[in-house]
Amino acid sequence: MAQGYKLVTRKVTDLKGGAAQEKVYAIPDYNGYTDMETLCMTIGARSTVSSADVKAVLDNLNFVLDMELRAGRIVQLGEFGNFRLSLSSKGANDKKSFTQADVKGARVIFTPGASLRNTKRLVAFTSTEKKEAESGGNPGGGEDDRPVIE
């Protein structure tokens, strides 16, 4: 199955401070969520463990992952991939003038393993614009799905 996309119009300026121009970009058009219960039931159906056992393992993975990341470790989950913390900071003129207050915040970085990297190469994309136009949607002017940067 192909990943759908829709088109949105955004105002952008170049780095030289020119006038803002409208450009059209493709963004993913997701078709829903898969919740924890569905994941656990699906994994349980494909294995010899129950969905309750899968949920218990995933809950514990979340707890231990948090604990290990807070301890400054990169967590390697084999073929699945790696999790690590990263941070951003304000720039300082030199090492002596840098303080802990210059550290802005942390984020969790996931680096996929070989199988998921392969998915990125093999995924097909298809436009969902026609589907939106037929249903009275607003092609090109949809909701912005970019993450909010604080």
Image (cartoon, rainbow, N blue to C red):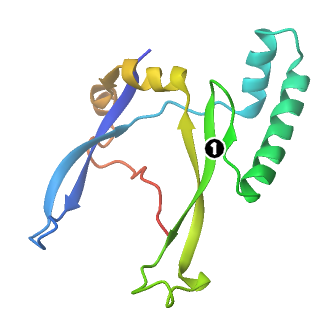
When the figure is inspected, residue 111 is found, relative to residue 124, above or below; the finding is: below
- Place of residue 121 in the rendered image (x, y in percent of width and height, measured from the top left): 37, 22
Q: Nearer the viewer, residue 145 or 54?
A: 54
Is the residue marked by circle 1 packed among few (<14), some (14-19), or many (20+) residues within 10 Å? many
- Place of residue 140 in the rendered image (x, y in percent of width and height, measured from the top left): 26, 44
Quarter of the image where one finds residue 127? top left
Q: Nearer the viewer, residue 37 or 18?
A: 18
Query: Which residue is outermost to the bottom?
Result: 97
Q: Amino acid at mark 1?
A: Phe
Horizontally, residue 14 falls left or right of residue 150, namely: left
SS under mark 1 = strand
The N terminus sits in image quarter: top left
Q: Nearer the viewer, residue 2 or 84?
A: 84
Q: Which residue is mark 1?
A: 83
Residue at screen point 70% across, 33% down: 35
Residue at screen point 38% across, 27% down: 4
The number of discs equals: 1
Horizontally, residue 85 falls left or right of residue 25, namely: right
- Place of residue 16 in the rendered image (x, y in percent of width and height, measured from the top left): 11, 71
Residue at screen point 30% across, 43% down: 138
Residue at screen point 28% across, 32% down: 133
